Amino acid sequence: TYNNLDMTLSRTFHAGLGEERYFEFRADAFNLFNHVVFTTPDSGITDTNFGETTGQRSGQNGLPATRQLQISLKFYY
């Protein structure tokens, strides 16, 4: 299992150009708390790394990679 929190904050601003024309400011955060997803421990009894987790699965198979932030400003007309 893994923890992942995505968050979006947005706000619309009417710029006095009419009701149909406005700006939208948006800030998105993906994997906000930057949780790492580790691989399963090595299960080979004779391996030197037996029982150790030596990698991470973050960024693979649709799992979130590191924290990503983006902002945007959109004008609707």
Image (spheres, helix red, strand yellow):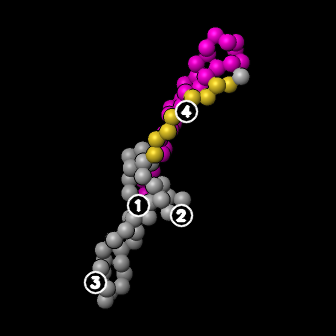
Q: Which numbered marker is on residue 37?
A: 1
Give the amino acid type for the residue marked by disc 1 in the picture: Val
Tag 2: amino acid? Asn
- Image point 71% across, 18% down: which residue? 20
Q: What number is the disc on residue 61?
A: 2
Say if the magenta span includes residue 4: yes
Whether pointer 3 and pointer 4 mark residues with C-beta atoms closer than 8 Å, the reply is no
Residue 8 lies in the magenta stretch: yes
Q: Quadrant of residue 21?
A: top right
Are the two marked residues, 2 and 4, in contact with CB atoms closer than 8 angstroms?
A: no
- What residue does disc 3 label? 48
Q: Identify which residue, 5 or 15, lies in the foreground.
A: 15
**Could you tell me residue 66's position as x and y percent?**
42, 52
* Mark before the other along the chain sequence, 1 or 3: 1
Q: Residues within 10 Å of mark 4 (few under 14, many from 20)?
A: few
- Tell me which label, 1 or 4, sits earlier in the chain: 1
Decide if residue 39 is on the left or right side of residue 71. left
Q: Earlier in the sequence, mark 3 or mark 4?
A: 3
Distance from label 1 to label 4 (Cα)?
28 Å
For the residues labelled 1 and 3, say whether their Cβ atoms are less than 8 Å apart: no
The CA distance from mark 2 to mark 4 is 27 Å
Q: Which residues are magenta?
A: 2-30
> Disc 1 vs disc 3: which is toward the camera?
3
Residue at x-position 31% and y-position 89%: 46
